[in-house]
Amino acid sequence: MSPVRPSSEPLPTGAGRSGADAWFFCLRILGGRYAFEAPLVTEVVRLGPLTRLPAAPSFLPGVFTHRGEVLPVLDIGQLVGQGAVGIRASTRAAVVHCGPWKVAVVSDGMEGLVLISRRLVEPPPAESTGLAEFLSGVARDRQGTIAVLDLPRLVEAARSRAVPHGSDGR
Amino acid sequence: MNDQVRELLLYQVGARTFVSPVADVLRIGNLDDVALGDLVEGTSLGPTFGRERGLAVATGEGAESVLVVDQVLGVRRVPESDIHPLPAFAAAVLPSSAVSGLVLLDDTPTLLVDLPTLLRERLAAGPARTPPPAATA
């Protein structure tokens, strides 16, 4: 239930606070470091007990209540076929708004906010499998490589892949 | 505070508890007198442990079917404020629209099931509405 706060890590070398910099929210999924635009994240929460939904796709392991609101959990690893993020009592999730959708993205660990110079974000690799399909770029800081996700496209892909039941899904 | 109250029927399918509006249930009873063809199992709620009780539900145009459940636990009066719609994203990716929301029962989220929709979806999916008779022994 902690609000999003900047990481205590030093800023990447050469990434000044100019207009070319941007805050990203960084988390770890299945051994990799991933980030997405920080304004999408409203808060980081600890998952409560999950309620499974009948016949739900694997990337929707359940829903949970948070401050009286029911939130769906999104497992990005399952969505891209790279395995499930282990969900346990200590698991935290980033609550994100992507267009009309509000979801809680689970991860193996949260790094928090990182400041990245947009000039240092390189194009994603040409491969288009798994999570690489949803990358908008690749950046680096002192801790290594960060894959920048196009989260709205990822969430929309989840919706469209689920083959909704004869509606537009809204 | 002008919180309306809804009457919900609690029942179990397998190990899980579900709730549905009482008004959607025509009758509750044993399965002995129900024609095999009227029984509905294998819904998205999951398999039953046994074939103990049935919920008769109108499925439209005068037709009715009987959902097989394991136990009927009773009726609860629940304030509307404890009933939450299914999150939009979950509703968009679920293959069934039978789960219409969640109800907080003693702080535990319990799935609110639209029984007519559940049965219509199962019936539309085709035959095998019940397991072979041998499974009832």
Image (cartoon, helix red, strand yellow):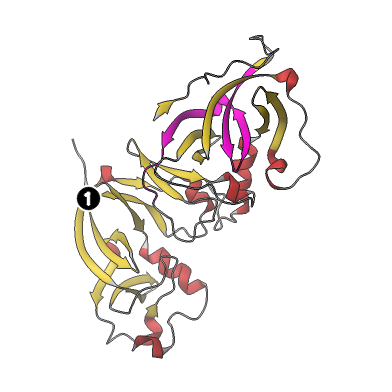
**Residue A109 percent location from the top left of the image:** 52, 36
**Farthest right residue in view:** A126
**Residue B40 percent location from the top left of the image:** 40, 76
Question: Residue A29 magenta-drawn?
Answer: yes
Which quadrant of the view contains residue A53? bottom left
Q: Residue at 55% across / 23% down in the picture?
A: A113
**Residue B3 percent location from the top left of the image:** 21, 41
Q: Residue at 37% across / 80% down in the picture?
A: B39
Magenta-tinted stretch: A22-50
Q: Work out whether residue A9 or residue A22 is closer to the camera in this orientation and state it.
A: A9
Question: Residue A72 magenta-drawn?
Answer: no
- Compared with A18, B48 (above or below) is below
- Which quadrant would the N terminus of chain A be assigned to in this image? top left
Q: Residue at 58% across / 50% down in the picture?
A: A78
Tell me if residue A159 can be seen: no
In this picture, residue A152 sits left or right of residue B33: right
Q: Amino acid at mark 1?
A: Val
Q: Which residue carries the number 1 mark?
A: B78
Tell me if residue A70 can be seen: yes
**Residue B123 percent location from the top left of the image:** 47, 74
Crowd class of label 1 (few under 14; some 14 to 19; many from 20; radius 10 Å): some
Q: Work out whether residue B103 or residue A100 is closer to the camera in this orientation and state it.
A: B103
Q: Residue at 35% across / 50% down in the picture?
A: B102
- Compared with A126, A2 (above or below) is above
Identify the element where label 1 is drawn. Answer: strand
Which quadrant of the view contains residue B87? top left
> Taken as a whole, is the magenta stretch helix, strand or loop?
strand
- Compared with B125, B93 (above or below) is above
Q: Please, which chain is the residue tagged with disc 1 on?
A: B
